Amino acid sequence: MVTGTGSEASAANDPAVGMSGLDPLDWDRLRRLGHRMVNDVFAHLESVRSHRVWTPVPDSVRERLLTPLLENGIGEEAAYSEFLRDVMPYGIGNVHPRFWGWVIGSGNPLGALGDLLAAGMNATASGLAGSPPLVEAQVLDWLRELLGYPVGTSGILLSGGSMANIVGLAVGLNERAGFDVAQEGLARAPRAPVLYASSQTHCSVERGVRLLGLGSRGLRKIPVDADFRIDLEALETAIARDRVAGRQPWAIVGNAGTTNTGAFDDLTALADLAARERLWLHVDGAFGAFAALVPELSPLVRGIERADSLAFDVHKWMVAPIEAGGVFVRDADAHRRAFAVAADYLSPMPGGLGQPDIPFSALGPQLTRGFKALKVWLALKAHGVRPYAELVRRNVQQARLLARLIDDTPQLELMAPVPLNVVCFRFHLPGAGDRALDVLNRSLVVRPQEGGVAAPSHTTLHGCFVIRACITNHRTRDEDLELFVREVVRIGTELGGD
Ligand SMILES: *Cc1c(COP(=O)(O)O)cnc(C)c1O
């Protein structure tokens, strides 16, 4: 039984705690295990350059990961040993200096400790009073300033860019569908709502329109120019045609850094068009928005401050431990309108826990929310802005270096412009057709991954399979890219090169 402040109710004399075993009987033992965990994780990160980038999960491990849950546990130390044996060695490799697949950040050790602290507090940044919403608000203020988004706008941290796109579009739909979507629902839509985005837009936007009940057909994919930027004329034509056909254009998605090639749509032109047509402008800046940190790159993001909503990721180029992303919304009332619902058990109180500074749970789909802000807050406070700006600048220089190495290698062919940190290329054989090259280049993605040497990913551009490297990695050195090019040429030559 707990009496007084609780300090005298130690685990040892509290039978309930002792029986559950969820708090340790011996805190010192768990503390020692915790120290071992920190040592092991940091040792792994410290020596990561000497490891393979990626190792396939062996069958023996797969089998052990299929065993059923036990009635009686094996204990903390034994469970941790299984983690060391079966889990830790088989991550996806994105902490390694030669991981450049998809768009995945390299994480940071201090941020990892931030997640430990957040979990230790077991904090939720929901609708309750306490430090978590204040820390989140401060992180949002810092990010707003870094990205050049207007002061006094609304925002929320989310799991990542996908949720950020969905939340931004949910607010936009509510504001611009031409009727009260929040109350009436799409079943009452007088005209079919249509959203516009370039063919290079991230798939989470399409998933978003599905979740919003608009279906994939509610998204009009607009062609791009030779630089993979949205074709503004085609966009205007599509909007005009839909209006004539009695549909309801409601939003444009602009890209600040496409996943395929890092292309930037002309955001100023999109903002002008959206204003003329009274459409919502949502900008997907998942990683590209952070070009704003580097003065030489900032022309790319010109106009981003005019977005009605702006999606960004913190776990990509800002290398926060996964998950962390967010969205800014220019009109704070619109943001609230989209998500506010009444519940007796959440009604505001004159004080106490029920009087939060910022009720973040009313600005997104989640009620109980992890304290993601803490790992970001801790890292930004400890490191300051400078290392992040340098990271963006260096990764962009490294992408240019990789493009030069490709240009200088007769067997390799650059397949897209490199406006930012994404490089798409392929191995070329004189006289070979595109389909034969597709087969060869598939192997040139898989072989370096399976060899543990490097982890590029892949995509398709103009119908051709290409090798793709997206550098959002603070551990990459120039020599890693040189090694990668040598490896691709070596394997390509072995598989059928001249
Ligand atoms: C990664 C990415 C997303 C999705 O973000 P997640 O954090 O993976 O959910 C959206 N848009 C772009 C441009 C991206 O690169």
Image: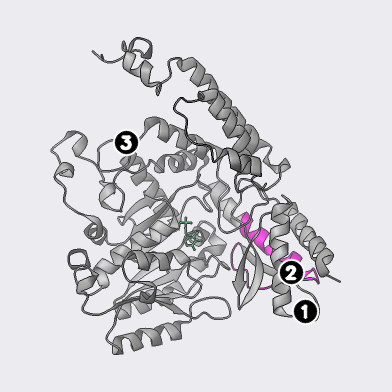
Between circles 2 and 3, the one closer to the viewer is: 2
Dot 1 crowding, Cα within 10 Å, few <14, some 14–19, many 20+: few
Magenta highlight on residue 419: yes
Residue 366 vs 440, above or below: the answer is above
The colour scheme used to paint the residues is one colour
Q: Nearer the viewer, residue 291 or 321?
A: 321
Image quadrant holding the N terminus, namely top left
Kindly identify the residue that appears in the image at 47 percent across and 30 percent down: 70
Indicate which disc, 1 or 2, sits on the residue closer to the N terminus: 1
| Secondary structure under the numbered disc 1 in the rendered image | loop
Residue 17 vs 246, above or below: the answer is above
* Labels 3 & 1 near each other (Cβ < 8 A): no
Kindly identify the residue that appears in the image at 70 percent across and 43 percent down: 49
Kindly identify the residue that appears in the image at 55 percent across and 52 percent down: 389
Q: Which residue is mark 3?
A: 131
Question: What numbered label is drawn on residue 432?
Answer: 1
Q: Position of residue 310 (x, y in %)?
A: 39, 62
* Labels 1 & 2 near each other (Cβ < 8 A): yes
Magenta stretch, residue numbers: 394-421
Magenta highlight on residue 189: no
Q: Position of residue 76 (x, y in %)?
A: 51, 24
Dot 2 crowding, Cα within 10 Å, few <14, some 14–19, many 20+: many
- Inter-mark Cα distance, 1 to 2: 10 Å
Q: Amino acid at mark 1?
A: Ala
Dot 3 crowding, Cα within 10 Å, few <14, some 14–19, many 20+: some
Question: What numbered label is drawn on residue 440?
Answer: 2
Residue 1 vs 144, above or below: the answer is above
| Secondary structure under the numbered disc 2 in the rendered image | helix
Whether residue 148 can be seen here: no
Q: Position of residue 97 (x, y in %)?
A: 67, 48
- Inter-mark Cα distance, 3 to 1: 62 Å
Q: Nearer the viewer, residue 400 or 460?
A: 460
